[in-house]
């Protein structure tokens, strides 16, 4: 690489410092007015939509290359398939879980009444009526939070879907728009960085999908061997929720435990133990190894960023921590290590 060429691409120190101080000032202002976390959550939601758009773009481009279909028709076909599968899965899974949940609610109600009757025999315990009131208040609070989280999740899914659809329909429009925000002398380099980001995030998505497929198949086989109802449906749900690192398997274990409880209480315990083991394997062995070979993300760095984003922002932060880490490493390697420090070997996030 020609050092003069690198020097031409090197960003101005004054401009970099101004951008850094401007970003810091904006973050401080948002933090003072108390909207930093909501703003960051919305930005991460848009970023998730961009990831979905990259996924749709890759599928559509692949189908267009291997069939006579034009890109727009290939995109329409993939969107139709995804929506159809999502609708069918929600209907099928929802109907069965709802039926099981109604039956389980009746059994839990009977068990609670029996517990209250037994507690009346012990004078040193609080009155059963007081405990029942406290329990109802706690349930009401949890239901309210669940409704809020559900509305937020539905809104997030809609935003991600349409942002991804628009990005996939005309990705060059948005890429050229971002490039035009950069001075003309830096536009060629900016285009290179965006192309590298697009390729890196695409490889990260491949790694994530591979992990989801493995967990889904393992869950379905394990539940089928244990005799839990609807093992395939639960396996599909586990695969989808695996996209959320660490937290996803916990969410997937809830309907599994509900259905296993209908078989026996010991079966529910076995299912919980099975999910704990599977979550440990997925979080600390499978996912870091897959991401290490699809995108060279250091496993310790990935887990650290997930913890920081999870505590500071919440679920959306945990979901987007790994792809944001990959994107940040690309930017640091290309714009700082290579262009600023003139290191000819900045390290590459490449497939091995």
Image (cartoon, grey):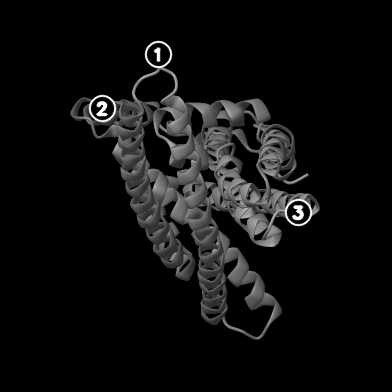
Cβ atoms at labels 1 and 2 below 8 Å apart: no
Asked if residue 180 shows in the view, the reply is no
Characterize the local packing of mark 2: few (<14), some (14-19) or many (20 or more) Cα atoms within 10 angstroms. Answer: few
Q: Where is residue 300 in the image (x, y as percent from the top left)?
A: 65, 25
Report helix, strand or loop for mark 3. loop
Report helix, strand or loop for mark 1. loop
Q: Residue furthest front?
A: 121
Characterize the local packing of mark 1: few (<14), some (14-19) or many (20 or more) Cα atoms within 10 angstroms. Answer: few
Q: Which residue lies furthest to the bottom in this view?
A: 68
Q: Where is residue 51 in the image (x, y as percent from the top left)?
A: 51, 54
User: Which residue is pictured at 70% across the width and 43% down the height?
Assistant: 267
Characterize the local packing of mark 3: few (<14), some (14-19) or many (20 or more) Cα atoms within 10 angstroms. Answer: few
| Number of the front mark, 1 or 2 | 1
Mark 1 lies on residue: 124
Mark 3 lies on residue: 227
| Number of the front mark, 2 or 3 | 3
Mark 2 lies on residue: 31
Separation of disc 2 and disc 3 at Cα?
51 Å
Asked if residue 306 shows in the view, the reply is yes
Separation of disc 1 and disc 3 at Cα?
42 Å
Q: Is residue 325 left or right of residue 163?
A: right
Cβ atoms at labels 2 and 3 below 8 Å apart: no
Disc ID at residue 279 = none
User: Which residue is pictured at 40% across the width and 13% down the height?
Assistant: 124
Classify the position of the N terminus by image quarter.
top right
Give whichever of 187, 86 is nearer the camera: 86
Report helix, strand or loop for mark 2. helix
Upstream in sequence: badge 1 or badge 2: 2
| Number of the front mark, 1 or 3 | 1
Q: Where is residue 153 in the image (x, y as percent from the top left)?
A: 40, 52
Q: Which residue lies furthest to the right in this view?
A: 225
Classify the position of the C terminus by image quarter.
top right
């Amino acid at each position: 690489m020609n050092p003069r060429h690198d020097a031409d691409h090197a960003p101005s120190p004054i401009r970099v410092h101004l951008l850094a101080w401007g970003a810091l000032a904006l973050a401080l202002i948002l933090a003072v007015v108390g909207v930093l976390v909501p703003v960051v959550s919305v930005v991460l939601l848009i970023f998730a939509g961009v990831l979905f758009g990259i996924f749709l773009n890759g599928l559509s481009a692949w189908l267009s290359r291997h069939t006579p279909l034009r890109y727009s028709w290939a995109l329409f076909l993939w969107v139709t398939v995804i929506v159809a599968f999502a609708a069918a899965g929600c209907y099928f899974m929802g109907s069965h879980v709802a039926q099981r949940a109604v039956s389980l609610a009746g059994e839990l109600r009977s068990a609670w009444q029996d517990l209250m009757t037994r507690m009346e025999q012990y004078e040193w315990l609080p009155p059963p009526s007081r405990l029942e009131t406290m329990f109802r208040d706690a349930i009401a609070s949890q239901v309210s939070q669940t409704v809020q989280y559900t509305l937020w999740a539905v809104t997030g899914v809609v935003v991600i879907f349409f942002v991804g659809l628009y990005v996939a329909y005309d990705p060059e429009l948005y890429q050229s728009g971002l490039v035009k925000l950069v001075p003309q002398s830096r536009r060629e380099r900016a285009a290179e960085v965006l192309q590298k980001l697009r390729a890196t995030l695409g490889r990260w998505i491949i790694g994530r999908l591979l992990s989801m497929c493995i967990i889904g198949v393992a869950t379905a086989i394990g539940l089928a061997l244990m005799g839990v109802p609807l093992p395939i449906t639960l396996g599909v749900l586990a695969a989808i929720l695996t996209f959320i690192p660490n937290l996803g398997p916990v969410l997937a274990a809830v309907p599994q435990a509900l259905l296993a409880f209908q078989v026996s209480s010991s079966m529910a315990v076995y299912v919980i133990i099975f999910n704990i083991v599977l979550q440990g394997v997925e979080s600390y062995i499978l996912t870091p190894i897959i991401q290490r070979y699809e995108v060279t993300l250091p496993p310790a760095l990935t887990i650290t960023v997930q913890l920081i984003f999870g505590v500071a922002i919440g679920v959306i932060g945990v979901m987007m921590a790994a792809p944001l880490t990959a994107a940040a490493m690309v930017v640091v390697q290309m714009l700082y290590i290579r262009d600023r420090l003139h290191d000819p070997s900045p390290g590459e996030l490449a497939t091995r």
